[in-house]
Amino acid sequence: MNSLTIEEIQKIIPHRHPFLLVDYIEDYEPGISAVGYKCVTYREDFFKGHFPEHPVMPGVLIIEALAQVGAVAILSQEAMKGKIAFFGGINNCRFKGQVRPGDKLKLETKIIKQKGPMGIGEAVATVEGKVVAKAELTFMVG
């Protein structure tokens, strides 16, 4: 297995606190897939307003975390090193559960199509084996 620490992730993707939403990569195969984790704590900045009395991680941030894991898979390819992956689209997005403080969010993105700088990833987020979000993510590398 190919794992990455937070420092190694930051060498691949440009995101930084408070917008880096991946704590570590458990396994990845350049250009194919990546599996990462976000350990959600009550101290996350977004919980101050979403929602103070019922803290729930915003769905769009779950999708962003999935995209960051996908970016690790794409940008770890030798030909893509030093580039940035941008969103091109989000299709078939579904939210199926809530992510709350204390959850360990598993983020899996498989690259199902890539042609040059564009591609599509199939992404699934789970907590304790239960799907909380899934989507098809289109990316463009620039």
Image (spheres, rainbow, N blue to C red):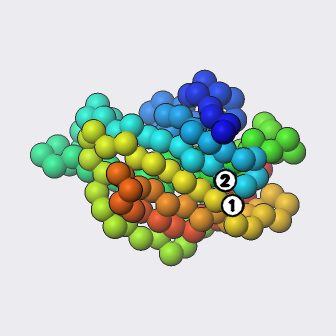
Q: Residue at x 62, y 32 (%)?
A: 4
Q: Is residue 42 left or right of residue 79?
A: left
Residue picked out by circle 2: 33
73 or 116, which lies in front?
73
Q: Give x and y (percent) for residue 130.
A: 36, 60
84 horizontally vs 80: left or right: left
The total of numbered circles placed on residues is 2
Residue 12 on image: x %, y %: 69, 35
Q: CA distance from mark 1 to mark 2?
A: 6 Å
- Tell me the element at label 1: strand
Which element type, helix, strand or loop, lies under badge 2? strand
Name the residue: 67% across, 53% down: 33
Crowding at mark 1 (Cα within 10 Å: few <14, some 14-19, many 20+): many
Which amino acid is tagged 1? Answer: Ile
Residue type (three-letter) at the residue carrying disc 2: Ser
Q: Which residue is mark 1?
A: 111
Q: Is residue 58 visible?
A: yes
The residue that appears at 21% across and 46% down in the rendered structure is 55
